Image (tube, rainbow, N blue to C red):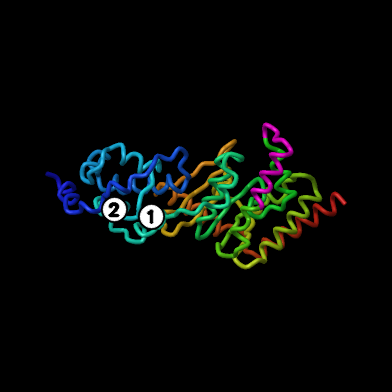
Amino acid sequence: MDHLTIRAADWPHTIPRKDAMPLRRDPTLRQRRLGAEMRKMREQAGLGGSQLARGLGLNPTQVTQMETGRIGVSADRLRTVAAACDCGNTPLINALADMAVERGKGWWEDYRGVLSTDFLEVAEVEGHAQKLYTCTTTYIPGLLQTSDYASAVFSRATPLPTRQDIALRTEFRMRRQQVLHSQKVPYLAFVHEAALRMQFGGSEILAEQLAALIQASETPGISVRVMPFSTDTFPGSSENLTFAEGVTPELDTVQMDVAHAVQFFDSPAHLASYRAVFARLDSNALPEDGSRELIRSIMKEVVNRYA
């Protein structure tokens, strides 16, 4: 009899049948992440799904459903799985246990079925972040956009959204900014000079957006750093990125905007790679004062050129 079966026999009370939960049709990103972290635990322990299932007195389907977020997991079961996988990372286990007992719905759930899942999942990541970093090359970061600028950005989408769709997406983007207004989540935005000059909606809207960006950069907890054209290297220059720090480093998340979609990455290799990207951005970007100076100069150019 293998060691896992022996250990499971010592814990008959940790896998109660009464804690079985109904299948979820559409697990949220956070629910899927909890399952994915459980899968990582199992894989790092060198256990197959069937082997873990036998050791815990479950069937393999239940393990698969837990690891894909299709069924809920109690904090007790999470800790039992962690013990069976010899996971000694206490901060991670505690953070996952807290995730397992989350029951409240975020404000973004009000838009489920109205907006695409991508919109909701971006807000979900931001809503649970401990700190946020962004890197943009083509537009001002969404969390710092004015309403008019956001509407202009959405109006450039292909296929062209209806006025109602543009209004709804803009409303959602403005609500996302609550995460910064609370001043509970530090935010660092790296903005390429190209994004400061790109016009969405015309010169007046751009000038107002740049003024708002300067004001935001002076708000406690918000830092705006500009990458000027003169910089000879710009890591991640083809991507608009967000790096969301979790409660523990293992729960960090990278969001990348791609054509017609949003992608999320959380593997150790991806996280390490993008930590390096943001470290290089921090080394090459202008300081805050220098960034504000450049933004002001561009704003004056826009006002004078189109006055």
Q: Are marks 2 and 1 in contact (CB under 8 Å)?
A: yes
* Left or right for 62, reference 239: left
Mark 1 sits on what residue?
96
Q: Which numbered disc, 2 or 1, marks the residue that appears first in the sequence?
A: 2
Q: Seen from this angle, which residue lies furthest front?
A: 18
The residue under label 2 is which amino acid type?
A: Ala
* Left or right for 90, reference 99: left
Point 56% across, 41% down: residue: 118
Quarter of the image with the N terminus in it: top left
Which picture quadrant has residue 228?
bottom right
Mark 2: secondary structure: helix
For the residues marked 2 and 1, what is the alpha-carbon distance in whole angstroms?
10 Å
Main SS of the magenta part reads helix
* Left or right for 303, reference 275: right
**Horizontal and vertical percent for residue 301?**
80, 54
Point 27% across, 40% down: residue: 49
Q: Is residue 40 magenta?
A: no
Q: In the rendered structure, which segment of residues is drawn in magenta?
A: 158-174
Please determine whether, in this image, residue 279 is positioned above or below residue 163: below
The residue under label 1 is which amino acid type?
A: Leu
Q: Residues within 10 Å of mark 2 (few under 14, many from 20)?
A: many
Mark 1: secondary structure: helix
Q: Is residue 163 magenta?
A: yes
**Horizontal and vertical percent for residue 202?**
79, 45
Front-lying residue, 9 or 210:
9
Point 64% across, 64% down: residue: 288
Q: Residues within 10 Å of mark 1 (few under 14, many from 20)?
A: many
The disc at residue 82 is 2
